[in-house]
Image (cartoon, grey):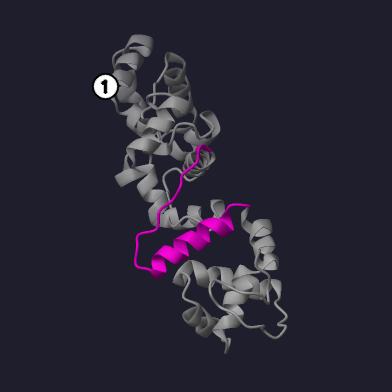
Amino acid sequence: QIHGGGNVGGYSGAQPSITWTAEEDMKLWNAQRELGNRWKDISAKMGRANSDHVKTRWYSDKFKEFVAGEFGGEAYRAAHVQGKQERQGARPQVEWTEEDDKLLWSACQDNMGNRNWEEISNKRFGSRMSDNHLKNRWYSAAFKKFVAKEYGQDAYQNAKIGRRGAQSQVDWTTEDDRILWESHSEMGNKWQIISETKFASRISENQVKNRWYSAPFKKFVAEEHGWDAHKNAKHRK
């Protein structure tokens, strides 16, 4: 086991005691995620004169404890392996676990319509997986298979909200159509308010509007309220 002043990956020689703050540890973590295991570059970015001090801190037990507390027990190992491969010019490999897939699925459900891979990487994975890793995993056959097994055959397809502006499919019921008709009678073409107050945002503003002008809804209105009811309702403000 390697300690702050011991041998580090082939490096030998005692180092003077250096006081590291939590802020500096975070800077070291962020710099390594950006630059890989390039200790001289990291040292320059952090404004430290001696790259060996930076390298020694990275391998120290105290730094590993800091990373585990901030980002989870597996974060250090994953970051170190990826940084090592990036230094060698290899494409970093990611070992995806079932928990990682669940976390990715959950994060994308929370960010529907605005799937920001960089934001998900930072907030949900502590940057231990890059935005490209997340994006590639989302579109991979392995992830689609996982989603089908865990959440149903149609779950992945229905989750593609926001991709090129597409909307998920809504199975409109007769009760939904009645709510839409009554809401329009009360509010007119205030689609966003209808979406939020009458459908609790489970059906989006655009989906409400599109349903109103659709042939199936016009047929429903004709059967329930008369053939000219929809036409006359269009005059409501």
Image position, residue 236 (x, y; %)? 39, 32
Asked if residue 80 lies in the magenta stretch, the reply is: yes
Measured along the vertical axis of the image, is residue 202 above or below residue 96? above
Secondary element at tag 1: helix
Furthest residue in direction bottom, as rendered: 49
Asked if residue 142 lies in the magenta stretch, the reply is: no
What is the count of numbered marks?
1
Would you call the spot at circle 1 few (<14 residues within 10 Å), some (14-19), or many (20 or more)? few
Identify which residue, 24 or 188, lies in the foreground: 24
Q: Is residue 224 left or right of residue 3?
A: left
Identify which residue, 86 or 135, lies in the foreground: 86
Identify which residue, 57 or 183, lies in the foreground: 57
Query: What's the residue at 51%, 56% (across, down)?
Result: 78
Measured along the vertical axis of the image, is residue 88 above or below residue 45? above
Image position, residue 171 (x, y; %)? 39, 21
Measured along the vertical axis of the image, is residue 209 above or below residue 44? above
> Residue beneath label 1, please?
215
Query: What's the residue at 49%, 28% (across, down)?
Result: 186
- Image quarter in which the N terminus is found: bottom right
Tell me if residue 200 can be seen: yes
Range drawn in magenta: 73-98
Query: What's the residue at 45%, 31% (across, down)?
Result: 203
Please identify the quarter of the rendering in which residue 145 is found: top left
Furthest residue in direction top, as rendered: 223
Image position, residue 70 (x, y; %)? 65, 59
Please identify the quarter of the rendering in which residue 173 is found: top left
Tell me if residue 234 can be seen: no
Query: What's the residue at 45%, 43% (across, down)?
Result: 112
Measured along the vertical axis of the image, is residue 184 above or below residue 162? above
Image position, residue 237 (x, y; %)? 41, 36
Given the image, on which type of amino acid does mark 1 rest?
A: Ala
